[in-house]
C-alpha cells in the first residue's frame, strides 16, 4: 500500500524558514517523480514544486521560485521542501504527491494527508 | 501559465442524478487533463487522466471527455459517497495548474 506521510509543518513568522518532509513507502520511491501541492484555507489546489525520480531536474511555481527548494533522498525514501522568506500567503496545507512516472507529465496518483504551514506574527 | 476555469462553482443535486462539470483551458492542452475528488479535510483522490482514462478502482459511473480547451466530468448516477469537491488539472506543461473546484452538494 502506497503511503506518504508529511511532517515539519507549524507556525512560523513572516520571513522565517521551515523544512517539510515526506516519508514514502509501499512503492519504489526512486522510480517516480514527486511533487508538493498546497491548499490555502478554504481555497483550491496549487502546484508548488516537482522533482524527477533521479533528482536531476526540479521545477517550481513562479510564486515560490527563489524561496523554496525541493530535494529528495532516494536512500531514505524521503522528499523535502525547504521553505524560506515565508509570507502570509504561503499559509496552506502542503501535500506531498506521487507522480505517475519518473519524469514527464505532472499528475498525481497518490497524495499524503498534508501538513499545515501557518505564517503569522 | 495556462488558466483552468471550472463551471459551475457549486452544483446541487440528488442521489441518482446525472451530473456534469465543465473545465475550460485558456489554451489548447490536447488531452493532458486529470480530474480529482476531494472531501473536506482529506487529500485529493485521483479519478481520471488523459481526459477520459479512468484510474483503476474508480467506479464506472465516472467518465471524462473532451480535448483541446473544453472538458467534462460526468457522474452518471450520483451516489452518497460522491458529494465532494472536484478539480480538473492540466499537465500540458511543467507548470501544472488546477481549476478552482466544483463543489457537488446535496439538494
Image (spheres, rainbow, N blue to C red):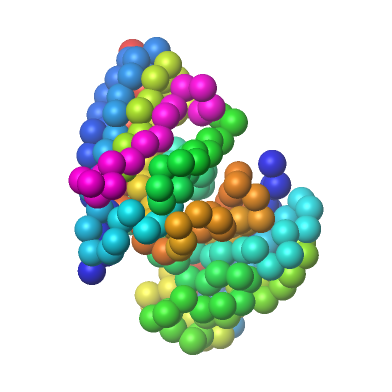
Quarter of the image with the N terminus of chain A in it: bottom left
Between B66 and A11, which is closer to the camera in this rendering? Answer: B66
Q: Is residue A108 above or below residue A83?
A: below
Is residue A75 magenta-colored? yes
Q: Is residue B52 left or right of residue A50?
A: right
Q: Is residue A28 left or right of residue B35?
A: left
Res B35 visible: yes
Is residue B45 magenta-colored? no
Quarter of the image with the C terminus of chain A in it: top left
Q: Residue at x 67, y 76 (%)?
A: B65
Q: Residue at x 23, y 33 (%)?
A: A8
State which quadrant residue A51 falls in: top left
Q: Residue at x 29, y 61 (%)?
A: A28
Q: Residue A61's spot in the image, x, y percent?
A: 56, 36
Q: Residue B42's spot in the image, x, y percent?
A: 33, 56
Which range is magenta? A64-78
Between A101 and A82, which is closer to the camera in this rendering? Answer: A101
Q: Residue B52's spot in the image, x, y percent?
A: 61, 77
Q: Residue at x 29, y 29 (%)?
A: A19
Res B12 visible: no
Amino acid at each position: 500500500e502506497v503511503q506518504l506521510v508529511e511532517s515539519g509543518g507549524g507556525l512560523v513568522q513572516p520571513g522565517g524558514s521551515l523544512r517539510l518532509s515526506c516519508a514514502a513507502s509501499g512503492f519504489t520511491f526512486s522510480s517516480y517523480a514527486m511533487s508538493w501541492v498546497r491548499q490555502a484555507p478554504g481555497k483550491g489546489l496549487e502546484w508548488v514544486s516537482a522533482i524527477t525520480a533521479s533528482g536531476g531536474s526540479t521545477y517550481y511555481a513562479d510564486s515560490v521560485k527563489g524561496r523554496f527548494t525541493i530535494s529528495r533522498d532516494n536512500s531514505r525514501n524521503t522528499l523535502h521542501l525547504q521553505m524560506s522568506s515565508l509570507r502570509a500567503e504561503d499559509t496552506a496545507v502542503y501535500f506531498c504527491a506521487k507522480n505517475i512516472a519518473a519524469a514527464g507529465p505532472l499528475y498525481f496518483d497518490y497524495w499524503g494527508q498534508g501538513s499545515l504551514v501557518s505564517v503569522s506574527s | 501559465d495556462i488558466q483552468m476555469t471550472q463551471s459551475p462553482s457549486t452544483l446541487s443535486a440528488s442521489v441518482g442524478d446525472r451530473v456534469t462539470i465543465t473545465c475550460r483551458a485558456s489554451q489548447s492542452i490536447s488531452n493532458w487533463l486529470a480530474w480529482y475528488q476531494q472531501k473536506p479535510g482529506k487529500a485529493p483522490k485521483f479519478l481520471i487522466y488523459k481526459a477520459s482514462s479512468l484510474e483503476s478502482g474508480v467506479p464506472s459511473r465516472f467518465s471524462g471527455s473532451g480535448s483541446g480547451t473544453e472538458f467534462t466530468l460526468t457522474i452518471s448516477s450520483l451516489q452518497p459517497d460522491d458529494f465532494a469537491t472536484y478539480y480538473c488539472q492540466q499537465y500540458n506543461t511543467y507548470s501544472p495548474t488546477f481549476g478552482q473546484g466544483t463543489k457537488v452538494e446535496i439538494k
